[in-house]
Amino acid sequence: MSNTFSRIITLLRKERGISQKQAAMELGVSQALLSHYEKGIRQCGLEFVVKVADYYNVSCDYLLGRTADKSGAIIAVDEIPNAEALDTDNKARGSILPVLNKKLLFNSMNIIFNLLQRCDNKALTNAVSSYLILAVYASFRQLYAANPKNPEAMFSVPAYAFQADVLGVSAKFLAEAGQLAAGGKVGDEEGLESEKAPFILPDNLAREFPLFASSLLNLLRKAEEML
C-alpha cells in the first residue's frame, strides 16, 4: 500500500478536527498503531481500510488514491460543471484585479482549447494541458500554504520540494509542446501535421472568437510586460 493511504487518513482526521487518540479509540486500535499507519511506518489490512472508510464516510477507492472524489465517483466529461455558466459572483471585493484576471484567463483558455481541438493531436493537447494544470496546482499550493493551520497531508509532494518539481516538470511539458507543435516527435508520439497547424492572425482571432479575442490579446500584452 502506497503512502497515499497514510496521507489521506491523516487529512481526514484533521478535517474532522479530532485528535489521534480519539480516532484510534473509535477505530478500535491503539494510538501508537494509528500513528504508525498515519506515518506509513506500518501497513494495515483490508479490514482496517474498510473500517476507516465507514468511519469517515468515504470510499475505499478514495482512501487508496484511486479517485479524487470521496464517494469514489469517477467524473465524466459531461459531468464537469461549466464554470462560466455558474459564475455569478463577479463583484469585486476591495479590488477589481482578481475579477479582471479571472476573465482574461477563462476567455483565453477557451481559445487555446478550441485551437487544440482543431489540431486533433492528443500528445500536443496533453502537453499543453499538463503545463497549465501544473500552473494551477502551484498557484493553489502557494495560497494553501499561506495558513500554517492547513494540513500538509492534502498533498503527497512535500512542501519543500514542490516548487522545484513544478518548475522542472513544467519546463519539460512546455518543451514537449513546442516540439510537437513544430511537427517533431516526442518518444513514440507524432507531432502536429502541418496542414492542421492553425493559421492565426489578430483579425482571424477577432472574427472567430468575437467574445474572447480581446481577452487573449490583453493577456499576451500583460505577459510580455512581465518578461
Image (tube, rainbow, N blue to C red):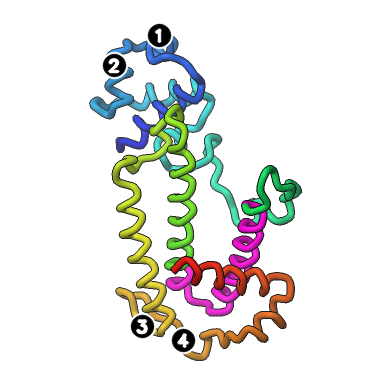
Name the residue beneath numbered marker 1. Answer: 25
Task: Kindly report which numbered mark, 3 or 2, lies closer to the viewer in this rendering.
Answer: 3
Q: Is residue 52 above or below residue 90?
A: above
| Three-letter code, disc 3 | Gly
Q: Is residue 143 above or below residue 214?
A: above
On the image, the x and y values in percent for residue 23 come to 42, 14
Give the distance between the C-alpha atoms of the residues marked 3 and 1, in whole angstroms. 59 Å
Pointer 3 or 2: first along the chain: 2
Looking at this view, is 144 or 14 the one in front? 144
**Residue bearing the label numbered 2:** 33
Q: Residues within 10 Å of mark 1 (few under 14, many from 20)?
A: few
Q: Secondary structure at mark 4?
A: loop
Q: Quadrant of residue 113?
A: bottom right
Name the secondary structure under disc 3.
Answer: loop
Magenta residues, start to end: 98-125
Whether tag 4 and tag 2 are in contact, CB under 8 A, the answer is no
Disc with the residue nearer the chain's start (4 vs 3): 3
The image shows residue 147 at horizontal and vertical percentages of 46, 32
Determine which residue is flagged by label 4.
193
Q: Secondary structure at mark 2?
A: helix
